[in-house]
Image (tube, coloured by chain):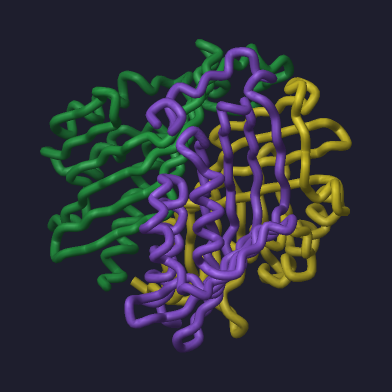
Chain colours: A green, B purple, C yellow
């Protein structure tokens, strides 16, 4: 078992999720190889880093709060290639639309070791469930802190 | 510290949780030794792998969505035996009954190293909290994706 | 990469979160150096272990249920010092006030290696979001198990 590579890949994934939720798009982009692909289901797929990052930058504006937590890494390393399964829990709070989404999914990623360290070659997931509701459905619901309040 | 054993036991636990939520019962069963025991509190205890797996297979049918995320592994290894504490967050969505459950618990597991790798010898947890409500309580609540919709 | 130190620091953090949610304050206090500092935002900061632990002991009484899950450890070790970023998801259920809080935050911790193992030198976080609502807002909401029911 290449424990150092496993730890490095975990930290790569955590940077991906941290920069996604903090909307730090330049740092986010640096975690992919240029030819990286993505597939988030329901037809939301990307061919190349620029397309993937561009979509996120455009659709996750300053008033949208996202929380992406990835758990349960099952990572296998073979030389300079690796594969990883993760169990996602995510939330989206879009106060402009009073919209709330919660769900879970299994990620299936591929990683490659470059001269600058491990990078994402493919990322994608399969949803296990997703629920949506409106902030208006819960009378006293308050977003007391979030991107929308500071942005 | 036996870091390789700790990593293997983590991945064993993640397979347990992944096959549980995906209802892959044969793969799930293969993670236990035959004489494994289980204790999920409130009298829900099992003596032997077949009883434990049989219960899950019967009660978690195709329309029930479950999410079991285990965090915070504190694993100690002593030769071919190991003990692990984990912090669970779980959700159950049973649309047939409009039922929602959310909760958390501390797992206390025992593992044993076999010729085929680490296996579960005992699993069980103690709940810290549990809440229930009905999908009907939140007017616009929609299960937009889940086992119930595909099964 | 000092993988053994990283694993020890993870387990230190997990004990911190476990003893916090189980309100085991003596075990909780033992995880800090005496001069430890804390900063939970919104002016909630502490200078010294006794002040930090005293606050928790006073404000998290037997009827308050808390869940603190920390994910995504990005830990870097330099000799006997270490730094760690974590992604928190927390819930607070205060049935006496029918109060529910859910949120997330990024922890930024500092650790120090002592003769007794790694200890917390500084802990603090920056919230990404926080929502609050009342148990009365969801008609059928039941806390079926929790500190409030046993305490």
Which residue is at a point 35% across and 76% down the rendered structure image? B117
The image shows residue B76, relative to residue B130, as above or below, that is below
Pick the front one: B52 or A13: B52
Q: Residue furthest bottom?
A: B79
Residue A22: image quadrant is: top left
A35 to the left or right of C74:
left
Pick the front one: A63 or C33: A63
Residue C112 visible in the shown view? no
C98 to the left or right of B73:
right
Residue B120 visible in the shown view? yes
Q: Quadrant of the N terminus of chain A?
A: bottom left
Pick the front one: C43 or A125: A125
The image shows residue C26, relative to residue A60, as above or below, that is below
Which residue is at a point 76% across and 25% down the rendered structure image? C140
At which x and y percent is residue A125? 31, 38
Which residue is at a point 34% across and 82% down the rendered structure image? B115
B114 to the left or right of C44:
left
Which residue is at a point 34% across and 19% down the rendered structure image? A59
The image shows residue C28, relative to residue A124, as above or below, that is below
At which x and y percent is residue C114? 59, 79
Pick the front one: B117 or C5: B117
At which x and y percent is residue A92? 48, 26
C123 to the left or right of A124:
right
């Amino acid at each position: 078992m290449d424990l150092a590579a496993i730890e490095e890949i975990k930290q790569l994934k955590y940077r991906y999720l941290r920069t996604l939720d903090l909307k730090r798009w330049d740092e986010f982009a640096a975690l992919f190889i240029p030819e990286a692909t993505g597939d988030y289901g329901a037809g939301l797929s990307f061919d190349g880093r620029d397309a993937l990052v561009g979509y996120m930058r455009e659709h996750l504006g300053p008033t949208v709060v996202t929380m992406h937590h990835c758990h349960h890494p099952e990572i296998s390393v073979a030389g300079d290639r690796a594969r990883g399964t993760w169990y996602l829990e995510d939330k989206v709070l879009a106060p402009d639309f009073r919209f709330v989404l919660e769900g879970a999914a299994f990620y299936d990623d591929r990683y490659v070791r470059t001269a600058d360290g491990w990078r994402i070659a493919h990322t994608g997931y399969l949803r296990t469930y997703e629920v949506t509701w409106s902030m208006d459905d819960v009378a006293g619901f308050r977003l007391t802190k979030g991107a929308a309040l500071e942005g």
